[in-house]
Image (cartoon, grey):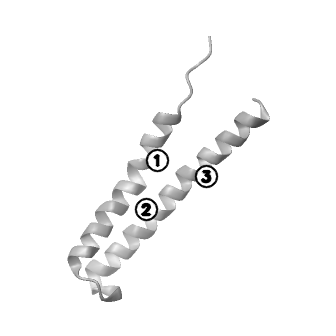
Amino acid sequence: MTPEDETKAQYRFLVINICRITGAIMLVIGLAVIAREAFGLPKVAGYVLFLVGMFDFLMVPVFLSKRWKSTPKI
């Protein structure tokens, strides 16, 4: 693996993990809003944050890894 390829792989790994972390944060904030109407937000906003966070935590990393998957060189 060339240094350029390794740098690209590290960048992609970082982006995927940032997506997971932001998704988890949105999930927690959404649950807090749903449970206690935290931050002065209505429950509907909590449900939206929860669903977007769930999508960001579970689906976005899968889509990114499939898009960035390298084809084997024969």
| First in residue order: circle 3 vs circle 1 | 3
Quarter holding residue 53: bottom left
Could you tell me which residue is drawn at 66 percent across and 40 percent down? 8
Q: Position of residue 40 (x, y in %)?
A: 30, 89
Q: Is residue 74 left or right of residue 22?
A: right
Q: Secondary structure at mark 3?
A: helix
Check disc 2 and give the amino acid type.
Gly
Mark 2 lies on a secondary structure that is: helix
Which amino acid lies under the numbered mark 1 shown in the image of this protein?
Pro
Q: Residues within 10 Å of mark 3 (few under 14, many from 20)?
A: few
On residue 39, the disc is none
Going from the N terminus, do you reach mark 2 or mark 1 first? 2
The percent coordinates of residue 60 (x first, y second) are 42, 48
Q: Which residue is mark 1?
A: 61
Label 1 Cα neighbours within 10 Å, binned few <14 / some 14-19 / many ≥20:
many
- Closer to the chain start, of discs 2 and 3, is 3
Residue occupied by mark 3:
14
Residue projecting furthest to the front? 4
Q: Nearer the viewer, residue 62 or 5?
A: 5
Which quarter of the picture shows residue 74? top right
Relative to 19, 42 lies left or right: left
